Each structure stands twice: as structure tokens, then as C-alpha cells.
Amino acid sequence: MTIIKIDDKEYEFDTLSEEAKDHLQSVKFVDAEIARYQAHIAVMQTARVAYAKALNAALVPESNYLDGDTIKLS
């Protein structure tokens, strides 16, 4: 007997309708995808910080700046 909790209410999984089980499966899939995308975003943010630091280290001294497009790195 598997008990699941939805919105602070407990349900026995085997007593759910097939429609409810299908929706539950979809919610679980979407939750897993959201977690996967959040992990991917965290990796991309970490990489961006590293690239921005490397770019700052590679830039010429401030006295050589030219007018032009501005890219915010932090």
C-alpha cells in the first residue's frame, strides 16, 4: 500500500483513478524536468562567472577603453 500526499491530504495510490494516476505521472515528470533545467542553469551561471572573470583578466588597462557597446559582466 503506497500512500501519497497531495496538498496536505493523503491518498492511497491504488485507489486513484487512471486519470489521476496519469496526471500524477505528468506532475512527477514535469517536476523532474524543472529540477534538471535548474541544475543546467546553475552550471551555465557558474560558467558565465568564470568566463567573465577570464575576460576581465584578458582586458587591456582602463586607459585603453574605447567608446562603444557596453556589456555588463557582473
Image: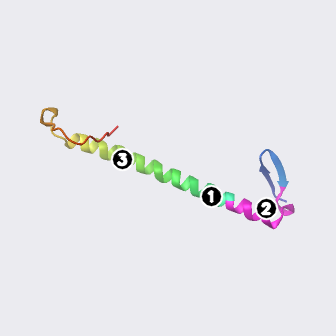
What's drawn in magenta, residue-wise? 12-26
Residue 72 percent across, percent down from the top left = 31, 39
Choose top left, top right, bottom left or bottom right for residue 36. Answer: bottom right
* Secondary structure of the residue carrying numbered label 1: helix
- Residue for point 73% across, 61% down: 23
Residue 38 percent across, percent down from the top left = 52, 50
Whether residue 32 sits left or right of residue 74 in the image: it is right
* Secondary structure of the residue carrying numbered label 3: helix
The reply to whether the C-beta atoms of the residues labelled 1 and 2 are less than 8 Å apart is no
* Residue furthest right as drawn: 15
Q: Nearer the viewer, mark 2 or mark 3?
A: 2
* Pointer 2 or 3: first along the chain: 2
Residue tagged by mark 2? 20
- Residue for point 77% across, 46% down: 7
Choose top left, top right, bottom left or bottom right for residue 52. Answer: top left
Whether residue 61 sits left or right of residue 29 in the image: it is left
Q: CA distance from mark 2 to mark 3?
A: 42 Å
Q: Which mark is residue 48?
A: 3
Q: Quadrant of the N terminus?
A: bottom right
The reply to whether the C-beta atoms of the residues labelled 1 and 3 are less than 8 Å apart is no
Looking at the picture, does residue 31 appear above or below residue 74? below
Q: Main secondary structure of the magenta part?
A: helix
* Residue 25 on the magenta segment: yes
Residue 32 percent across, percent down from the top left = 61, 57
Residue tagged by mark 1? 30
Looking at the picture, does residue 52 appear above or below residue 37? above
